[in-house]
Image (cartoon, grey):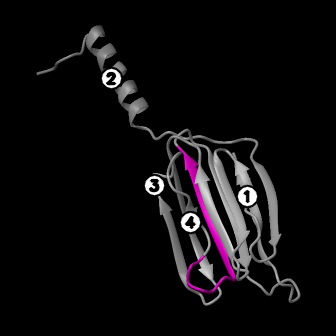
Amino acid sequence: MKQTIGRCGLLAVITSSVVLVANAGPAIAITSNPVAKTFSFVGKPNSKTTTIVNVDSLLMNARCDPRGNPVIFAFSSAQSADLFGRIFDGLGRLHIVKSSSFVKGTKGVALSTSSGDFDATGTMLYEISDGTVVTVNYAFDNSTTLGKQNVCTVYGSYVAS
């Protein structure tokens, strides 16, 4: 038995297919003009907190503690954001940073190691729900560094949408 779909039926099938495809696809944001910048913090033991990154609702601060170890924290002023990253210390240990609720009003997230080995590298990925992304690559070292100076350092670069 042969059955045909009338014009109204065909229109209903096409409309529901288009709606299904439109709602099923992921949200994608592509930035055509990303911003890339570098930063460097060099401080003496017990130094004041300094902003090293402040872009797209992501704030990163650095300071040196009384023993000359770097202390790095990140904060968000976004209503819905994530922060994920990895830090490798000088002994090859991996430190994971993960916050899927990295939002305004929450506690800052430590981006330096607490293992006692403060020469390390890190990569952080920050995303806001609107598709804004910031990638931060950084390194840090404790006293003595930079030719045996009694300072700590935090330096790197970021790419922001």
Q: Secondary structure at mark 3?
A: loop
The residue under label 2 is: 16
On the image, the x and y values in percent for residue 146 come to: 86, 83
- Distance from Cα at disc 3 to Cα at disc 4: 11 Å
Q: Which numbered disc flags the more N-terminal residue, 3 or 4?
A: 4
- Distance from Cα at disc 4 to Cα at disc 2: 41 Å
Q: Nearer the viewer, residue 85 or 46?
A: 46
In the rendered image, the vertical position of residue 103 relative to residue 18, given as above or below: below
The residue under label 3 is: 100
Amino acid under disc 4: Gly
The residue under label 1 is: 158
For discs 1 and 2, the disc positioned in front in the rendered view: 1
The residue under label 4 is: 85
Residue 127 painted magenta = yes
In the rendered image, the vertical position of residue 22 relative to residue 147, given as above or below: above
Residue at 57% x, 71% y: name it: 86
CB-based contact (under 8 Å), mark 3 and mark 2: no
Amino acid under disc 1: Tyr
Q: Nearer the viewer, residue 133 or 138?
A: 138
- Distance from Cα at disc 3 to Cα at disc 2: 34 Å
Range covered by the magenta-colored residues: 113-128
